Amino acid sequence: MFQWRGEVPRGLPDWKDEEKQHLGEELSDVLLYLVRLSDICGIDLGKAALRKLALNAIKYPVKLTHFNSDTTNSPVSLNVNADIVNDNKNKDDKTTLVVNSDGKS
């Protein structure tokens, strides 16, 4: 659906309701496939996602992240247990993850 549209604005203001509904159906297909695949593979998808967010927070620290001041994507802090990253070695450690309101870390 996005192949011919290029970059699209937040909320898809120029899209018809039918197009948004179709997009929702396509995204649901992807989500259901992903959940099924993770189940078949024995992957805890929630834990894997949290671990990936924590790893990204380490790889891309806040001080190196640039926020566009002319958008509403202000950063939001989220504390993530370091045991997610360190495979439960030290549960007292914390990693602070900053995520934009659009979900990008």
Image: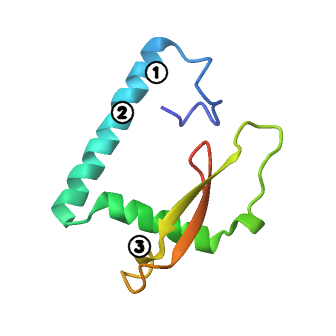
Measured in 3D between alpha carbons, the distance from the residue under mark 3 to the one under mark 2, in whole angstroms, is 31 Å
The circle on residue 20 is: 1
Determine whether, in the image, residue 35 is placed left or right of residue 80. left
Tell me where residue 20 appears, x and y as whole percent.
Answer: 46, 21
Q: Residue at x 69, y 41 (%)?
A: 73
Tell me where residue 44 appears, x and y as whole percent.
Answer: 27, 63
| Residue type (three-letter) at the residue carrying disc 2 | Glu
Q: Residues within 10 Å of mark 2 (few under 14, many from 20)?
A: few
Element under disc 1: helix
Q: Residues within 10 Å of mark 1 (few under 14, many from 20)?
A: some
Q: Nearer the viewer, residue 38 or 71?
A: 71
Tell me where residue 38 appears, x and y as whole percent.
Answer: 25, 59
Q: Residue at x 20, y 65 (%)?
A: 41
Q: Residues within 10 Å of mark 3 (few under 14, many from 20)?
A: many
Determine whether, in the image, residue 92 is placed left or right of residue 76. left
| Residue type (three-letter) at the residue carrying disc 1 | Lys
User: What is the residue that sits farthest to the top in this orientation?
Assistant: 17
Q: Which residue is mark 3?
A: 84
User: What is the residue that sits farthest to the front in this orientation?
Assistant: 92
Q: Are marks 1 and 2 in contact (CB under 8 Å)?
A: no
User: What is the residue that sits farthest to the right in this orientation?
Assistant: 69
Q: Earlier in the sequence, mark 3 or mark 2?
A: 2
Element under disc 3: helix
Determine whether, in the image, residue 36 is placed left or right of residue 54. left
Q: Earlier in the sequence, mark 1 or mark 2?
A: 1
Q: Residue at x 19, y 58 (%)?
A: 39
Eyeballing the image, is 16 above or below 72?
above
Tell me where residue 78 appears, x and y as whole percent.
Answer: 55, 57
Q: Which residue is mark 2?
A: 26
Q: Residue at x 40, y 20 (%)?
A: 21
